[in-house]
Amino acid sequence: MSSESARAGLAAPRRIQAVVRELGLDPEQVLPHGHYIAKIPVEELTARAAAPDGRLILVTAMTPTPQGEGKTTTTIGLGDALRQLGKRTAICLREPSLGPYFGIKGGGTGAGRAQVTPAEAINLHFVGDMYSVSKANNLLAAMVDNHIHHGNELGIDPRRIVLRRVIDLNDRALREIFVGLGGVKNGMPRKDGFNITPASEVMAVLCLAQDFTDLGRRLGEMVVGFTFRDAPVRATAVQAVGAMQVLLRDAIHPNLVQTLEGTPAFVHGGPFANIAQGTNTALATRLALKLAECVVTEAGFATELGAEKFFHLKCRTAGLRPAAVVVVATAKAVAYHGGSKEDGGLANLAKHIENIRHFGLEPVVALNRFDDDQPADLDRIVKFCARQGVEAAVADHYQRGGAGAIELAEAVLRSIERNRRRKFRFLYEPGQTLERKLDVLARKLYGADGVDYHRSAANDLEMLERHGFHLLPVCVAKAAASLSDDPARRGRPRDFRITVNELRLAAGAGFVVAICGNIVTMPGLPKVPAAARIQILPDGRATGLT
């Protein structure tokens, strides 16, 4: 029995072949990684291209708090509940990063009785996808520097290399470094730095790629820097794409595991939710939709960040249409954002309900219950949602697993029927300018009065227009703790503007990142990191991992 199952008082997990059969797949065609993990070849998606899709359910949230709202546990609990109701269900999650796991946030596999298993394996090395992304990214970086060292025929300006190396750990000392020191044999000295692996554009590319061919095209479109003549240099120019594809050859196949209750779960890809789309791979989601009636997935952060990127970046790219949206709320989050007042925490929740309606969908509110919640507080929030015309359900999946989310699952199924009559829509068109797209997002989703541009961002905008990148979709990186770009402004801020400090090109992923505020792409460790609590016992078992 797995340690997670034992702690939850559940039966031992099924062998992965049983999970594969539940989805209607042939166990002989999958790629097993031990007893409880398997990769599903992308050819299984190709073979089912003409099959109908199941219903896609997105789990998002109100504005985050330091304690978290429980999007992952809600995603898992909802999936387990739908399966208990007789629906053929699959869950789609991102792969956790070692950086947060050893830092302060912890793992990304859920909690309590709402977990995916084997949690320790998933949170640690899993199947090596993170390493493949790191190696592909760093190979490209090495080939750029090698090209410069051996004559620089492309005329790459070392001062304008935008590709950074990556590692899947938190290490603030690597944010700004110098490379090429020690003489001419070691290359040209220049300033460089590291990002954490989930912040790599290679990760974003992997998560949006439609197949092997599209993966290669997107990798080739990556802009690594600019020449002395101001021309963009792509990965194809340094002849790195073929080798990068080889390194990602296994990583492209979706990973299948299960929840503690045995619900099939695809855990694949792990882009950050601030400077990337913050969702699992399009391939895993599309495959799950071919294999299940209901597919539950999540997007990082709240509706104005995670859900917006899920809709505009992932759904538009992969041709997906969500059937239902769940907004996770907690009594603690309502209190944190100003309490149960129309201008406080309830106003924050109301804004996120409004945001989903902007996309033409009617959401369901999942009120994730904590042990010390007061019934009166929960009842007050449910009644508030009713006044907003939204169905809300109190969920206790942390303590009770799928049984604790049955009411939520039933509300979601009713929402799917209601949304059948509604038309899902985007808030901007692809051909609109970056300025127009940012203005629409700021005004409609954040509640801002408009957008201002720092001088450096204005220069970036001029460069993007000069090279024809100004029509790409936008991926906003801003404070997640507020609807504004100031994390101190809780609730539903009014009378503010968004300031764009920088625009970063991610041509392979197919978007431009708008940096609003001080966004860090290489986190640091806290004073007492989680890694300090981890120990190995004499029998090889680990403690402190969860």
Image: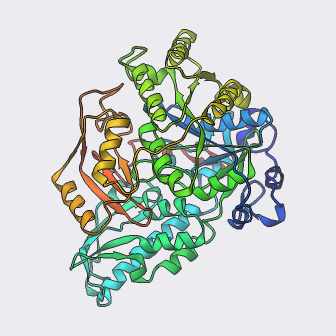
Instruction: Give x and y (percent) for residue 409.
Output: 68, 30
Q: Splitting the image into 4 quarters, where does residue 490 fall?
A: top left
Q: Is residue 92 left or right of residue 346?
A: right
Instruction: Give x and y (percent) for residue 272.
Output: 45, 51
Quadrant where the C terminus sits is top right
Q: Splitting the image into 4 quarters, where does residue 109 fall?
A: top right
Q: Is residue 96 left or right of residue 432?
A: right
Instruction: Give x and y (percent) for residue 313.
Output: 47, 53
Type of colouring: rainbow
Outermost residue, left direction?
A: 455
Q: Splitting the image into 4 quarters, where does residue 418 fall?
A: top right
Q: Nearer the viewer, residue 481 or 386?
A: 386
Q: Is residue 531 left or right of residue 438?
A: right
Q: Is residue 371 above or below residue 68?
A: above
For the point 75% across and 53% down, the residue is: 36
Instruction: Give x and y (percent) for residue 332.
Output: 48, 22
Residue 540 appears in view = no
Quadrant where the N terminus sits is top right
For the point 72% across and 53% down, the residue is: 290
